[in-house]
Amino acid sequence: MAEPVNNPQPEYFDVKDYNDALSVTAEDLSYIQIKLQFLNKEHVIIDEALFSVANIKQAVFDYLNRKAFIKKIGLYMNEKEVFLYSSKNGSLSVMVLNDDMRRVKNLDRGIQGQLIDFYEDKIKTILIGLTQ
């Protein structure tokens, strides 16, 4: 019997792995929470957490200190996820929301775009501050 072919997963980030194509509306933004998600090597969710936006610093702290193969941090709005940063296998966190995904999710203009930019910058500032 032939051995199965082992096709390892690519080691680069693909934005589609981190965000679905669901559009976000202005109404969705009234329900914003910070979401953390942790996955193992098989990309199975092993833990998740939601934080109020008032506790964003604690959310970023927990994101940085939790060990997992893939870690994601972003926003949870009205049952929709928008992950903003991710870390894979202990690497530095990188932005995962590119221009194409912003357009697909309707986050490239108006209040949606402004709030995404605000939280992206806020999380980045806290990430930098906590790692210095």
Image: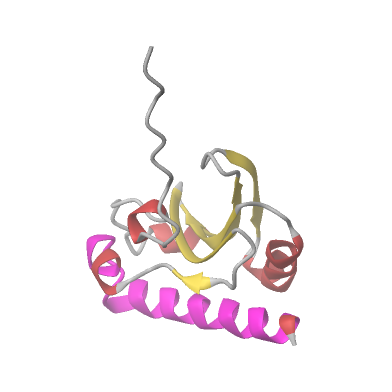
Expressed as whole percent of the image width and height from the top left, the position of residue 119 reads 51, 76
Taking the image as shown, residue 123 lies to the left or right of residue 98, namely right
Expressed as whole percent of the image width and height from the top left, the position of residue 88 reads 56, 60
Taking the image as shown, residue 67 lies to the left or right of residue 74, namely right
Residue 113 forms part of the magenta stretch: yes
Q: In this rendering, is residue 19 above or below 92?
A: above
Closer-to-camera residue (67/112):
67
* Residue at screen point 46% across, 46% down: 79
Q: Residue furthest top?
A: 1
Q: In this rendering, is residue 107 above or below 128?
A: above
Expressed as whole percent of the image width and height from the top left, the position of residue 94 reads 50, 73
Instruction: Name the image quarter holding residue 44.
Output: top right
Q: How is the image coloured?
A: secondary structure
* Residue at screen point 37% across, 31% down: 5
Quadrant where the N terminus sits is top left
Closer-to-camera residue (115/19):
19
* Residue at screen point 69% across, 64% down: 59
Instruction: Name the image quarter holding residue 35.
Output: bottom right
Q: Which residues are magenta?
A: 102-130
Quadrant where the C terminus sits is bottom right
Residue 50 forms part of the magenta stretch: no
Taking the image as shown, residue 66 lies to the left or right of residue 28, namely right
Closer-to-camera residue (61/8):
8
Q: In this rendering, is residue 95 above or below 40?
A: below
Q: In this rendering, is residue 56 above or below 17?
A: below
